[in-house]
Structure formats: structure tokens, C-alpha cells
Amino acid sequence: MNHLAHLHLAWPDPGLLCGAIEGDYRKGPVSQSLPKPLALGVRLHRRIDAFTDSDEALGGLRNRFPPSLRRYAGILLDLAFDHFLALHWTQFHADMLEDFAEQSLDILERESHQLDARSQRTIRGFREHGVLLRYREWDMIAGSASRVGERLKRGNALRDTDASLRALRPDMEAAFLAFYPRLMGEVRRWRALAAPEPAAV
């Protein structure tokens, strides 16, 4: 899952929302010095990633990517699934995507003092470029993938992914619609055990 899904699954708890972003940048054991709500958010981020990575059906879909892209298939699926979440948003959330994006950014900006500088830059980028709403655009997937590829050490293997993504688009959409409700159920179970009392927004 990428940013939009992580935020959706963390909603509306401020600590979990912050962890949805911070989880991309915190590696290794979760520091005991982190505020407890943020630490829970990082742990939720990791649980979402682990549950997604271990799904057998998604593993089969990753293996259908061209050999040159297969090692990056998880990244591409994460981006594609954010697109399909935005596209089918009303199936999964009561509020309009515009309202959710605005409210999420308000919370993240309010709480950003406790976040890594990289998380703070990510949040500023969300605001400046309307990233969360732009996930509704198909071209956002290949564009985001290319920007990720610029950070690869062996050259940008993700520069031209659109044709491969389009070939798998129906299968990716069907996989998302089958998988995401299962993921939501897993997150509900996790939150009931780990964070039973969400903080007020």
C-alpha cells in the first residue's frame, strides 16, 4: 500500500495517521523514545505492509509483471492500489476524497513537529501538489514510479512502465477490489487489540 491507503487505514487517529507517513522512514526496532501514538502508527504501517506482502494472490500477480520489472512489482502494485482506492473511494469511506484529504493534511500538519524531516517534506508535497487527490489519475502511477526509479542505484528501471501497467490494469483492479476489504478487516482486528481508543480529531 502507498500513502493514500495507509492514511485511509489509519483514519481518524492522529498518531496512526502520523505513523502512516513516518513508517516509510523508520527502519529497525521502533524506538521507545517515540510518543506512544506515533509508535503505534509506525507499527500499523508495518503490519499493513507485512499483510500485503504475504498475500498469495498478490504474490501471483507480482509474478506476472515482465521480468525486467518483477523485482519492483511490489512498488508498482502499491502505487496502482492507491489509484484504485481513489477511483473506488465511495465504496470504502463515507466522506468525499476531497474532504478526507483536507482533514488528513490538517492533522498531519498540526502534528508534524514530532516527525522526521523527510516525513515533513512528504506532507508539504501532499499539500503543494495535491498528491492525495491526484491518485485518481492513471498517469500518476507511472509518473510516481519514475520518480522512485530516480533513486535507484543502478539506473532508472521504472522510467517507462505505463505499457506494462496498462496490460495488467484489469487484473490489478480486480485484485485490489478483492484484497482491500480483507486488509481493512485485518486492520480493524489489529486496532482493536493495539489501539482500542482512537484519539479524538
Image (cartoon, rainbow, N blue to C red):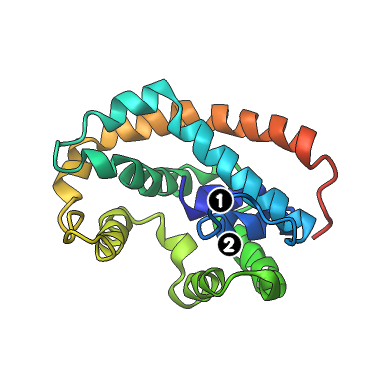
| Mark sitting earlier along the chain (1/2) | 1
> Does the rendering let one see residue 11?
no
Count of marks placed on residues: 2
- Residue 85's tag is none
Query: Please, is residue 62 above or below residue 46 in the view?
Result: above
Query: Front-most of 90 and 41?
Result: 41
* Amino acid at pointer 1: Gly
Residue at the (69%, 76%) spot, across then down: 113
Q: Could you say where residue 174 lies in the image, as x and y percent from the top left?
A: 37, 29
Residue at the (62%, 68%) spot, across then down: 105
Judge the density around disc 2: few (<14), some (14-19), many (≥20) Cα neighbours within 10 Å: many
SS class of the residue under badge 1? Answer: loop
Q: Nearer the viewer, mark 1 or mark 2?
A: 1
Q: Could you say where residue 20 lies in the image, as x and y percent from the top left?
A: 59, 54
SS class of the residue under badge 2? Answer: helix
Image side of residue 112 versus residue 21, left or right: right
In space, the residues marked 1 and 2 are separated at their CA atoms by 29 Å
Q: Could you say where residue 172 lies in the image, as x and y percent from the top left?
A: 32, 34
Q: Circle 1 is placed at which residue position?
A: 28
Image side of residue 52 versus residue 170, left or right: right
Residue at the (65%, 52%) spot, across then down: 30
- Residue 101's tag is 2
